[in-house]
Image (spheres, rainbow, N blue to C red):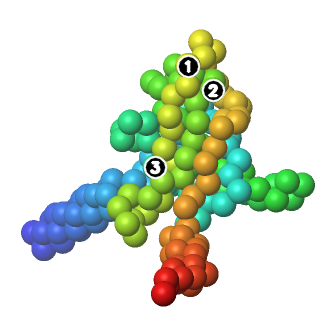
């Protein structure tokens, strides 16, 4: 009987340890917040989203206020349609706010940065952000810099 009691206690201890580990893993990876989508959704169109991924942060003044919840291609306009989920406490964003795809650091992850506009109307569920700026692709910038430098002619020498 004592052996069964000991085995039961060890089993409970192992189960609690696994549950705690799973909870910690979900919190660290922020997967636990996927089902907790209580915010409102807005969309934005971009010509190029670079390496933007689903679940990338949406920030305002450097503060995370939401997440990217969807990335699709509009087959008529050939633009990326990005769906953003904004947390409900940030429901007073002006309707003419703009969205840019930014990079944290030189080679860091990409995220969506919002800049508030000046209108009295506010974004609501289903709104579309009209003013957007696509991602700056580092490879294109470097390539453009090299082609510009190569196309410059050396200054003419005067006799």
* Number of other residues with Cα within 10 Å of mark 2, as a class: few under 14, some 14 to 19, many 20 or more: some
**Marked residue nearer the N-terminal end (3 or 2):** 3
* Residue located farthest toward the front when viewing the structure as drawn: 159
Residue at 50% of width from left, 34% of height from top? 115
Q: Position of residue 143 (x, y in %)?
A: 56, 78
Which of the two labelled residues, at mark 2 and mark 1, occupies the earlier sequence position? 2
Q: Is residue 19 above or below residue 118?
A: below
Q: Position of residue 24 (x, y in %)?
A: 28, 58
Whether 125 is drawn above or below 48: the answer is above
- Alpha carbon of mark 3 to alpha carbon of mark 1: how far? 23 Å
- Asked if the residue at tag 1 contacts the one at tag 2, i.e. Cβ–Cβ closer than 8 Å, the answer is yes
Q: Residue under circle 1?
A: 118
Please count the marks in the image.
Answer: 3
Q: Is residue 3 visible?
A: yes
The alpha-carbon separation of the residues under discs 2 and 1 comes to: 7 Å
Tell me which label, 3 or 1, sits earlier in the chain. 3
- The disc label shown at residue 96, or none: 2
* Of the two numbered discs 3 and 1 in the rendering, the one whose residue sits closer to the viewer: 1
Q: CA distance from mark 3 to mark 2?
A: 20 Å
Image-based side of 75 in relation to 58, left or right: right
Question: Circle 3 is placed at which residue position?
Answer: 57
Q: Is residue 34 left or right of residue 15?
A: right
Which residue occupies 54% across, 70% down?
Answer: 141
| Helix, strand or loop at mark 2 | loop
Label number found at residue 7? none
Residue extending furthest toward the left = 2
Residue 14 sits in quarter: bottom left
Q: Alpha-carbon neighbours of circle 3 within 10 Å: few (<14), some, or many (≥20)? A: many
């Amino acid at each position: 009987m004592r052996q069964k009691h000991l085995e039961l206690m060890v089993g409970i201890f192992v189960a609690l340890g696994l549950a705690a580990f799973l909870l910690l893993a979900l919190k660290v990876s922020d997967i636990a917040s996927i089902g907790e989508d209580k915010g409102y959704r807005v969309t934005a169109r971009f010509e190029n989203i670079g390496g933007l991924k689903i679940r990338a942060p949406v920030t305002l003044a450097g503060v995370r206020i939401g997440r990217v919840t969807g990335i699709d291609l509009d087959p008529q306009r050939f633009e990326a349609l990005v769906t953003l989920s904004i947390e409900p406490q940030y429901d007073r964003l002006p309707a003419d706010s703009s969205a840019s795809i930014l990079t944290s650091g030189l080679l860091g992850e990409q995220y969506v940065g919002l800049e508030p506009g000046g209108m009295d109307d506010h974004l609501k569920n289903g709104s579309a952000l009209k003013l957007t700026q696509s991602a700056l692709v580092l490879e294109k910038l470097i390539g453009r810099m090299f082609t510009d430098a190569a196309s410059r002619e050396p200054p003419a020498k005067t006799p």
